[in-house]
Amino acid sequence: MSYNVFIRTISLTALLLAVALPLLGQTSAHAQSGTDDPPAITIGPDQDREFEKRAQSLETQLICPICPGETLDQSFVQISQDMKRILREKLQEGDDEQEIKDFFVARYGTSVLAAPPRTGFNLVTWVVPPIGVGVGIVVLLIVMRQMKRGSAGPVAAGVGGPATESELSDYLAEVDRDLLSDQPSDEPGEPENRSAGD
């Protein structure tokens, strides 16, 4: 096979792939959705702004069951789109917000609620954080008061005062002994000579 034939074959294959792959991608994306309906929810002409505000408010109060920490208004997976559609259908049927929340809680459990209910064990999530902040503020105030008192008191005798000449010379002699004992010597039993710069 000649070089020119080889290059033409590769070029033709690349051209066919460049045309075919985008078409295959669109087909597989449509096949994954499983419906002929577009996945996005749009505001129809019969829906007024108040209805849409209520629907969007509910979307912020419900969490997508498969998206960790994402509310329905943030999620774009198919299940959240289905939940948005059901939510709007129930609003059109005349259900109030609590009935719609109860429907989704019965279907997915309390984890579908963005804010946990203020009953039972979930009450801990509402009570403990403010108590923790309050205790932290009290502890901070007590520590600050103790620090303020400690700095204003007189210095005890012998603590923090200037050292006398004899105390300083004794201390420096002890430091020199410690330094000499830690240094390795050239000859056994004899300390190493220190340079004048040390």
Image (cartoon, rainbow, N blue to C red):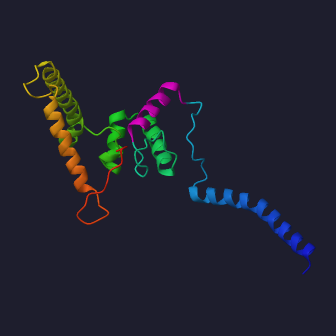
- Whether 96 is drawn above or below 25: the answer is above
Q: In which quarter of the image is the C terminus?
A: top left
Residue 101 appears in view: yes
Q: Position of residue 78 (x, y in %)?
A: 51, 51
Residue 122 in the figure: left or right of residue 96: left
Residue at the far left: name it: 157
State the image coordinates of residue 139 (x, y, percent, origin top left): 16, 29
Q: Which residue is drawn at 92% across and 78% down?
A: 2
Residue ranking furthest to the bottom: 1
Q: Quarter-wise, where is residue 144 in the image?
A: top left
| Above or below, comparing residue 62 to residue 160 in the picture | below
* Picture layout, residue 129 above or below residue 22: above
Residue placed at 29% from the left, 40% from the top?
116
Q: Does the magenta stretch include residue 104?
A: no
State the residue in front, 179 or 60: 179
Secondary structure character of the magenta stretch overall:
helix
Q: Where is residue 50 in the image (x, y as percent from the top left)?
A: 48, 25
Residue 141, x across and y down, in percent: 18, 24
Q: Is residue 124 left or right of residue 184?
A: left
Q: Name the residue nearer the viewer: 56 or 115.
A: 115
Q: Is residue 191 above or below residue 173?
A: below
Q: How many labels does the image show?
A: 0
From where the camera sits, is residue 34 visible?
no
Residue shown at the point (22%, 41%) measured from the top left:
122
Give the side of residue 82 with respect to residue 155, left or right: right
Relative depth, front residue between 177 and 30: 177
Quadrant for the N terminus, please.
bottom right
- The answer to whether residue 57 is magenta is yes
Q: In which quarter of the image is residue 129?
A: top left
Q: Give the range drawn in magenta.
A: 47-62
